Image (cartoon, helix red, strand yellow):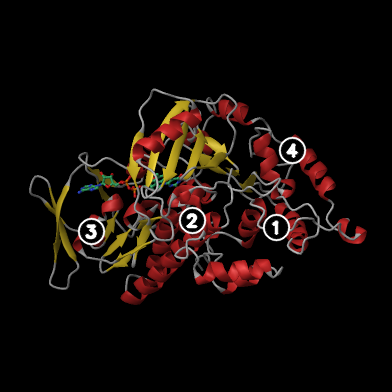
Amino acid sequence: MFARVLAGRVDVTVIDSDRVPTIGVGEGSTPKLRAFFAAMGISDEEWMPACEASYKVGVEFAGWSDYPGHKSYFHPFFAHFDRDHVKGLAFNAALRRQGIDLPAHPDLFCYNRFVAQKRLSPLVPDRFPFDIQYAYHFDAALLGNFLRRKAMDAGVQHRERHVEAVAQGADGAISGLHLDGGEIFTADLYFDCTGFRALLSEEALHTPYVSFAAALPNDRAIAIATAADADLPPQTTATALEAGWAWSIPLRSRTGHGYVYSSQFLSDDAAERELRRRIAIDGGDARLVRMRVGRLERSWTKNCVAIGLAQGFIEPLEATGLALTQFTATRFAWHFLTKGTDPQVADAFNREVADAFDSVRDFIAAHYLTSSGHQTEYWDHCRANSAALSDNIKAVFESWFRGEAIEPVLTSRRMTQYFSANSWTYMLCGKGVFPRVTQLSPPDPSVAEKVPVASIGRFIERCLLNHEGHAATLEAQRGASGGAACPQPAEALRILCANGLSLEPLQ
Ligand SMILES: Cc1cc2nc3c(=O)[nH]c(=O)nc-3n(C[C@H](O)[C@H](O)[C@H](O)COP(=O)(O)OP(=O)(O)OC[C@H]3O[C@@H](n4cnc5c(N)ncnc54)[C@H](O)[C@@H]3O)c2cc1C
């Protein structure tokens, strides 16, 4: 991205050690990634077959609630007309919080849930002029290799060397990197992409780390792959288990499964057994991944900017890792082009990055606080976890239970930098976070007719006639020619900003 967006202004060198493997997980994404590929001039036809990628239109949450009728729900990437439909959901849900019997399950209102259920592709022909948001699932290792080649085509130098030590000047800034073989590599600015170890930012510069472990206790994941699902559902499934949750991610070549759990409540062996039981598989390698959940106090310190796992990580319940990485890189490029690299720029950048991480943390924590699907020690802890209940979440819950609109609270507290009020509404309605009254009251007939749920369903069904099957669409990509025009640098940054996290475009 830097080589394209800052073309002519910077030279980029990547130093990458063959002695330290990449984390090797991370197969799901959010619609932000579409903007990345568009800005880089890479078409779906070009990269998706090469990376065994499939489309993703949202996440199905299963087993997170015991509220009748709400055992599962879909958190979609939004379609154009969901903006209207979600108003109907919010209207019904406000009355539902007063004990009135109105349909308030988000699946009834949500376009992409239907797309996923019917195993359709999110792509639509030009004659259907409504945007359907989507993202991707992919093989992370293949995508890394693909992007390495692309970066080198764009002029990035790639050097397979190990960083042995970080040299610092009298002012504490990085003055060079000692590489294996004795060479000292120097640059104007260093990006720390060394993963959880944060070799430059934390080990060398001692940037403080803000742990989210108390709020989000999951610190492990076990990953296992099974054969590909011929049905290719265009969705991730996140199923609540005894001491965490399991992902299921359908790629063309395999289905990835993983159990995200807390080592305080479950041993690694027990987690592997539970995951294997769930997916009914004895053989095959299981990979254990240790996760560190939190963020650096400052992503940018002196002449070093941490990006990726080095800057922080929030457990992958909503697959936000790459989106936060993309946000950080986009925001850096924007500041660099408009204001350079003076310390005040770094302060503004650091606040934005911290806000983005913290707002994602709150949204993920709210999933656990509102869960009711399992009665185990782990889930009892999550529901009663006062460390997760930030003042921001408390304010949203108070407003929700007063029956008010939550959007003003979310906006005034800068909580919509990543997840919109619609996402919060879907999550709370999806789990059935309503008062548990023994008997709901029937609605007044005039109120019952206000939101025509059946006609929303019929409307969506007719719109779906414009979609092809998901598997067939992916198959057709294989032989298709894949070129896309590469936008000029300013245009590439505009695309990234327009689709980023509340970013204003470059003037
Ligand atoms: C369990 C789990 C699930 C995830 N799921 C998702 C998901 O669904 N969606 C999503 O968007 N994200 C997800 N993520 C996050 C995602 O995997 C990462 O953001 C992504 O892989 C990028 O990682 P990284 O490059 O920052 O770190 P790494 O993959 O750890 O790479 C670190 C790099 O630094 C190099 N390095 C380290 N030390 C040295 C050294 N001394 N000298 C030279 N080079 C060095 C290594 O060689 C390596 O190339 C998940 C993460 C975890 C842990």
> With respect to residue 37, does 329 lie above or below?
below
Q: CA distance from mark 1 to mark 2?
A: 20 Å
Badge 3 is on which residue? 200
Q: Are marks 1 and 4 in contact (CB under 8 Å)?
A: no
Check contact, mark 3 vs mark 2: CB within 8 A: no
Q: Residue at x 12, y 72 (%)?
A: 170
Q: Residues within 10 Å of mark 4 (few under 14, many from 20)?
A: some
323 or 498, nearer to the observer: 323
Q: Nearer the viewer, residue 220 or 163?
A: 220
First in residue order: circle 1 vs circle 2: 2
Q: Alpha-carbon neighbours of circle 3 within 10 Å: few (<14), some, or many (≥20)?
A: many
Q: Amino acid at mark 2?
A: Cys
Task: Using the numbered discs, state the Cα–Cα distance from disc 3 to disc 4 in whole angstroms.
Answer: 50 Å
Mark closer to the chain start, 3 or 4: 3
Say if disc 1 is inside 8 Å of ligand 1. Answer: no
Residue type of the residue flagged with mark 3: Leu
Say which residue label 4 marks: 464
Q: Residue at x 26, y 69 (%)?
A: 302
Q: Are marks 2 and 4 in contact (CB under 8 Å)?
A: no
The x and y percentages for residue 177 are 16, 55
Q: Nearer the viewer, mark 1 or mark 3?
A: 1
Identity of the amino acid at label 4? Answer: Leu
Residue 124: in sight, yes or no?
A: no
Mark drawn on residue 436: 1
